[in-house]
Amino acid sequence: MIKHFITLQWKSFFRSASLGKDLGVRIFMGFLALYFMGSFLLLGIALYPVLTELYPGEDQLSTANSLVLYWIAAELVCRFFIQTLPVMDIRPLLLLPVKKGKAIHYLLLKSVFSLFNLFPLLVAIPFAIYGAAKGGYEPRVMFVWIVAVCGLVLSVNFLNFLLKKKLAGTMKTFFPFLLVVLALALCEYFEVLPLSALFGSLLGAVTAYPVLLCVLLLLPVLLYMVNYATLKKHFYLDASIGRKGVQGSTADMGWVRKFGDIAPFLQLDLKLIWRNKRPKSTVWLSLFFLAYGLMCYTNPAYRDTPVWYVFVGIFISGAFMINFGQFIPSWDSPYYGMMMAQNIPLKKYLASKYGLMGFSVVVLYLLSVPYVYFGWEILVLNTACALYNIGVNIPVLLYAGAYNKKRVELDKSPFLNYQGTGAAQFVVILPLIVFPVILWLIVRQFVSFDAASSALALLGITGIMLREPMLNAMAKLYKKRKYVAINGFKQRES
């Protein structure tokens, strides 16, 4: 049966309507995986010599054991935000004589072969080999240590799924858990309760008494069984029908009506952002990336290469614009066909998107004004970049949106979610970020800093003045490609 499930998913991938995009993303992720595999392997090879240099005269295996808890904590955080349980379409299976247990076992066992479980082994195995060859440790001890690490890795793998199930759904459960974790971290930091040392001692006891390895290996088995029971309990199409009802927001955002003809579209966009997980994440990411300037403005290395300040200026005021604008009109994909069947002027639809993104640029720019603390030239450059974003980058995003035809599910997690990503999202990066950086660098090289910043600002002002003819031209383009977009939005990615 497991072989049959693999065959079904193989056919589902190659028969998908989004095969081209899926292949491109998987190839890119493959190169990214090879990079991280090489990085972790180099870390494993260098770990023993580095620990010897940092902790001379100490037992390196004991030192490594005391650091394992930090590794587990960091890995669990990364897994919580990135790793998800492998998925499969269960609807056809529920109509066939297929035991639910076998499908659940397939999903859980498939998660064992995740790259997240390989990365720690690429560090642990070279460290163990080096310790046996150069450190004088018995090969039997290092073998037991590797098996213990494997048990911990699998435990983290299955624990992550349980935590995501319990914590990711509601803030009421997440915040108490976060407070407990912070309290334990403070106890470790102030050495009130040395958790890392205690954990290292327990791991050292396992290598000293291999019989304890059986107890350690029971932990992933127990977590596997808990995951199995949890998934089996919800392995129904109507599993969520009996959940407790939650009163939805009834705010109609009537204050938007004062914006005239584009008000209905602005209401739809604001409700879409407020009520759905993925578009709402663009707001939080924009506020989070406001702090990106602190990484550059406080770093003396960037003072000699101020061209990086252009990138920061574009990114700070345009974070929401970029994250939201690159998926226009895919945000409306669930009901785009219905909208296009109405007597809706496309120019007003695009004008509402322009106004929303322009307003976000102004707000983020005003929030970035305190960066003037690092120099007036920072404020001047950020002002020029904000004008460039409004006058040039927003029209570029709207133009590129005419070629978007990938559906976006609004309630999906935004982390490593490439749904809706096509060639347009990659090509549009050049005019958004690369072109203003190159333009500013050339003008500054041959003229001055003020002239380069003025060039960006003048381009932005020119784009703002040409807003109406650009919207007219883009409305014609959207109308021309209307049926291509509707047909693409009907395709659901596997």
Image (spheres, grey):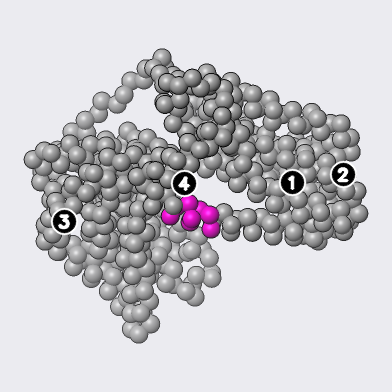
Identify the image quadrant of residue 135: bottom right
Q: Which residue is mark 4?
A: 416
Residue at horizontal 32 percent and vertical 57 percent from the top = 424
Given residues 148 and 61, the one toward you in this image is 148
Residue at horizontal 51 percent and vertical 38 percent from the top = 7
Cα–Cα gap, marks 4 and 1: 28 Å
Given residues 302 and 80, the one toward you in this image is 80
> Which segment did they paint magenta?
24-31
Q: Amino acid at mark 3?
A: Leu
Q: Amino acid at mark 2?
A: Val
Helix, strand or loop for disc 3: helix
Q: Is residue 91 left or right of residue 101?
A: left
Which of the marked residues, 2 or 1, is nearer the chain's N terminus? 1
> Is label 4 or label 3 in front?
3
The disc at residue 477 is 3
Image quadrant containing the C terminus: top left
